Image (cartoon, rainbow, N blue to C red):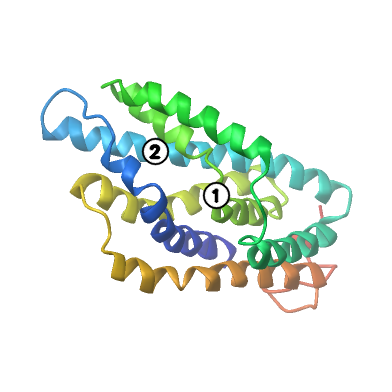
Amino acid sequence: MDFGLAFVLGFLGSLHCAAMCGPLLLALPVAAGGAGRFVAGRILYQLGRVLTYCLLGGVAGLVGQSFWLAGMQRGLSLGLGVMILVGFFLSRKLAISAPAIRWVAALKTAMSAQLRQRTFSSLALLGMLNGLLPCGLVYAALAGAMTRGHLAESVAYMAIFGLGTLPMMLFIGLSGRLVPLAWRLKLRSIIPLGICLLSALLILRGLALGIPYLSPGPDSPCCRP
């Protein structure tokens, strides 16, 4: 169920990405050649973004694994679930910090340099840099990945999240059109549901209520390091 939720969160999150990153997709350089190279370039860009998610998942997995080995997996799951909920409700009220602004500025400078190139490598690098842009949905997915307790599962969790974003983002990149505003407004309203479901699942896992799959007891094999 966790991995399925990662895919759903990625798919719903891509509706948010359509508004935030859609203009960048439309501005991507076109590698010299025919239609085949155009399609290959757009696919490489998206795979670069997913690769960054996997690398971030590896970092989250190492952190989460240390909590599991210390026997603190329940506290980690509870804490992350609460943090997601609090962050979700306060995100619109919190000001962006100066380090975050500098980070985004540095990323934009690096991306601008790559936008002037017309090679496959520049498109892949652009995708990787795009995956580093601040995004609440990515942070929520990383929280889910961190609670997996194993490095490979954390990487797989973020890979599935990234795959969930591919249909919408590839559609925009290949068609050259943004999703109509009316569709985005309707479908983006579902995104909070996915975030709240992930938060509820993490909290349930931390409570260890003995509910199979949803909230396994403390003696369950999946709750032991």
Decide: few, some or many residues near mark 2? Use Cα within 10 Å; few <14, some 14-19, many ≥20: many
Identified by mark 2, the residue type is Leu
Can you identify the residue that label 2 sits on? 47
Viewed as shown, does residue 101 lie left or right of 191?
right
Residue 194 x, y percent position in the rendering: 54, 69
Give the x, y percent position of residue 211. Answer: 73, 79
Reply above or below: 213 against 165: below
User: What's the CA distance linking mark 2 and mark 1?
Assistant: 18 Å
Please give the name of the residue rendered at 60% of the width and 39% of the height, measured from the top-left corner: 56
Residue 181, relative to residue 56: is it above or below?
below
Task: Determine the image quadrant of residue 174.
Answer: top left
Residue sitting at x 68%, y 64%: 90
Front one among 195 and 160: 195
Left-right relation of 24 to 100: left
* Side of 175 where 207 appears, left or right: right
Badge 2 marks a residue whose secondary structure is: helix
Discs 2/1, front: 1
Q: Secondary structure at mark 1?
A: loop
Residue at 20% in and 47% down: 176
Q: Find disc 1 in the rendering and name its residue.
A: 135
Nearer to us in this view, 114 or 167: 114
